[in-house]
Structure formats: structure tokens, C-alpha cells
Amino acid sequence: MKRGIIGIPLGDIAGVGPEIVVKALANPAVYQTARPLVIGDASALRRALRVTGLDLALRIVTDPAQGQYQPGAIDLVDLANVDAEQVAFGQVQAAAGRAACEFIEHAVTLCQAGQVDALATTPINKEAFKAAGIHDIGHTELLGRLTGTHDPLTLFQVFDLKVFFLSRHVSLAGAIQLVTRRRVLDYLQRCARALETLGFPQPRLAVAGLNPHGGEHGLFGDEESRELEPAIADARQMGIDVAGPIAADSVFHLALNGAFDAVLSLYHDQGHIATKMVDFQRTIAITLGLPFIRTSVDHGTAFDLAGTGMANALSMTEAIRLAAVYAPGYRLA
């Protein structure tokens, strides 16, 4: 199988991003499935190598085709846009936010040019973005803007459990207001198409309930009967295989054990808690609906660990692997 070129924008260099990247790329197994290409800054990688004590060479390339993609060296597109020695570990800084945004912008350009097959991203810091005057609240929003994609889908995967999100970075009160028949139906259609792009020709979906015990027929809330059940009925009439609403305390367990290909979670923490309790380090975020696959570690910049060399690289390793697995067959629905 041809190994795809997986672009890895370095993220916020005040956090653990550079450290988990060099740790992941010190693992020869990564190169069995992927050709990893870092898009970042050489000074940040050199500092990460010093902090982690790893002995890896840096191979600077200007074109992804120049990379050798072999263990023992990191292939790097060096934007030389920040002096890592002037960026303190563990602090919100405009310079780090600006550089992180530029890493992502260049990585997207390479993907759109067909020079990179997929992205596996490292953590950014929303406050650092704000300090740098960047208005995108996160990776998904930035990638959507850069590619002209309206409301990209977020999918979490841990082992065989896949979870979509009806809403992401809004308050819980705001998320409840987004649980509408129209929005749920739209997402069910999009989730079904997204699963098809990942190789599920007849995807089986489930919708998580919002209220305790799925509302108990209105005893604990009527969103299930008022919004969710009609949306599910509409989806079934369109030929979508969808069950629910199923109480959130059981639907994720059922999906993990093979009852469904994916679950539509109704708000941020509902799905985050479910996946991360299965395996925090192996939970990977996947953005769908873009012109290319993007995977990501599902943890933050971990400012408290930055510079210690103690950050765990398993999530980064898994993000690179999944990007390589899904990239060859991915197509926009």
C-alpha cells in the first residue's frame, strides 16, 4: 500500500505540540503506514529534541516531494516564522498563536495543491489565537474558512466507537437550543454521507438522548418527543438507517460493541466524556466535509507539561496513523 504524505502543522509551540511530534516520529512504526511531513519552525523542533533527549536529524525541504520519509530524521517544511527561544513554555503568547495559524495555513495550501494527502494536527491555544488577532475559535473553524467549507463535521473515533457532534463550542444552554428537528435531520444526512466517504456503504446511526432516560416520554423533558423523534422519522423516510433517541447512558456502550457505526451526540461534553473514558490517549478527532481528511490529537496544549518532556505521544501517533488509513479512499460526498 502506498504511504500517503501526512502533513503535521506544529501547533502552539508554547505547548506540548513539538514534543509529541518528535516523540511520535521517533517511533519507526509510524513510517510503516505514513510519510510524515512537519510544517513548522526548525527552532521549535530543535528545542523539542533537546527537551525530550531524542537524537533525530532535521531534513529541511521546500517541496514535499523532496522528503525521504525514513526513520531517524524528521522531514520539515521550515517556515522560519518564530524564534522558539523567545517563546516561553506554558504561557499564552501572541507570537505562538500567530505562528500556529501560519503553520496551518501553509499545510492547507499544500493539501489543496495535492502535495500532501491529509493533515494530522497538534494542539493550538484559543487564547493565543485571540491574542494574535485571529478570530477563528479553533482548528475546525479555521479549516472551514480556509477551504470555504460551511460547518465541517467533527467525528471522534476511539477503537470502533465513532461519535459525531450536533454542536461543538457553544454553552450547554446554547447547545440545547440547537436540538431542533431541522438541525438534527440535516446532521443525520451529513453524518450518513460522511460515513460513506470513510468506507461504510450502508451506515447504521444512532441518536443520543438529551434528557435523563431519554426524557421518559416527557417526564424529564420533551426534546426527545418534540424534536428528536420527528427528525429520526424524517431520516428513516429518506432511507437512512438510524435508531433512537437512545438514552446517553447506554448508546455509546452499544456503539462501542458494534450495534451502530456511529452515534450523533447532541453536545460537546456528552460525546467527549463517552469517548475519552474508553481511552483518553487513543481518542482522535476527525474533521469531515473538507477537501481532505484532517485528524487531530484530542487534547490541548497541556501548558503544565510543556518543556518537561513528559507529554504522551500516543494520541499524536494514532492521529497520524488514522490520517494515513482514511486518506486513500476519502472523497467528498
Image: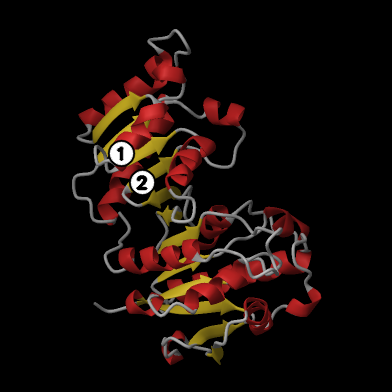
- Asked if 204 appears above or below 246 in the picture, the reply is below
Q: Give the residue type that dot 1 points to.
A: Ala
- Residue at 53% across, 89% down: 62
Quarter holding the N terminus is bottom left
Which mark is drawn over residue 55? none
Tag 2 near tag 1, CB within 8 Å: yes
The location of residue 309, given as percent across then percent down, is 64, 70
Q: Give the residue type that dot 2 points to.
A: Lys
Which mark is drawn over residue 162? 2
Circle 2 Cα neighbour tier, 10 Å, few/some/many (<14 / 14–19 / ≥20): many
- Residue at 73% across, 77% down: 84
- Residue 114 visible here: no
Query: Secondary structure beneath disc 1?
Result: helix
Quarter holding the C terminus is bottom left
The location of residue 279, given as percent across then percent down, is 44, 50
Q: Camera-side residue: 117 or 44?
A: 44
The answer to whether residue 240 is left or right of residue 81 is left
The answer to whether residue 120 is left or right of residue 301 is left
Q: Quadrant of residue 126?
A: bottom right
- Residue at 42% across, 9% down: 218
The location of residue 207, given as percent across then percent down, is 35, 31
Q: Camera-side residue: 24 or 177?
A: 24
Circle 1 Cα neighbour tier, 10 Å, few/some/many (<14 / 14–19 / ≥20): many
- Residue 257 visible here: yes
Pointer 1: what residue? 255
The number of callouts visible is 2
The location of residue 129, given as percent across then percent down, is 70, 58
Mark 2 → mark 1, Cα distance in angstroms:
8 Å
Of all residues, the one furthest to the top in this rendering is: 219
Q: Earlier in the sequence, mark 2 or mark 1?
A: 2
Q: Quadrant of residue 71?
A: bottom left
Q: How is the image coloured?
A: secondary structure
